[in-house]
Amino acid sequence: MGEVKKLVEEGKIKYIGLSESSVETIKRAHKLHPITALQMEELGIGCYRELGIGIVAYSPLGRGFCRGRVVAETMPNGSQLANYRRFNGENLEKNKLLYPRVSMKHGCTVPKLALAWLLHQGDDIVPIPGTTKVKNIMNNVGSLGLKLGEEDLKEICYAVPVDEVISKREMGILSEYTWKFANTPSK
């Protein structure tokens, strides 16, 4: 972090962002130089707000789960999703039961509702949903116009409690390298 701070001081870069960092790493890095943004898939870290760090929410539609593709269709042969425990066998069948719980009373798709919910979590969170289809981009942008009240936000949270999602979000082989264990060594 000290070397990256030098790059800021030299005018070579303007802002510093981290990706999938642990709370300990974030706090130590932020002491050396303010962190502008943190890219992460899970919003479980509370220290980012108190430090004034923006969140770039990676894969906010659950690697396509909120699009319904994995729920409604058979996973294509060779799909990378097959490497994730959430999308395999019994785990997938249990997770599929969560999908219809999200209320459609807002007259929109589940992805639009999921992104709108995320956008209502604060101005310091920016989702980056990936897609290869123009219609999905248009649907994603439409989430900006969806207005949700406090009761709507609570309903969405209670519809799919995080602790009911079966299995971890990462590939099995990579689970020991996630942000929870991604502490950089102290000097």
Image (cartoon, rainbow, N blue to C red):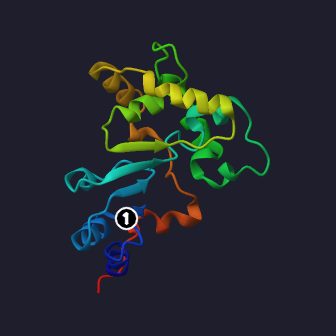
Of residues 83 and 5, the one drawn nearer to the viewer in this rendering:
5
Q: Which residue is drawn at 37% across and 50% down?
A: 55
In-image side of 168 versus 49 (left or right) = right
Secondary element at tag 1:
loop
* Residue 178 versus residue 133 in the image, above or below: below
- Residue 84 appears at what percent x and percent y? 60, 53
Q: How crowded is mark 1: few (under 14 residues within 10 Å), some or many (20 or more)?
A: few
Query: Could you say which quadrant of the image residue 146 lies in?
Result: top left
Q: Mark 1 points at which residue?
A: 14
* Quarter that holds the N terminus: bottom left
Query: Could one spot residue 97 in this view of the protein?
Result: no
Numbered label tally: 1
* Residue 56 versus residue 23 in the image, above or below: above
Q: Which residue is drawn at 69% across and 41% down?
A: 132
* Quarter that holds the C terminus: bottom left
Q: Residue at x 31, y 39 (%)?
A: 123
* Residue 71 versus residue 91 in the image, above or below: above
- Residue 34 appears at what percent x and percent y? 26, 64
- Residue 88 appears at what percent x and percent y? 64, 47
- Residue 169 appears at what percent x and percent y? 51, 51
Residue type at mark 1: give it.
Lys
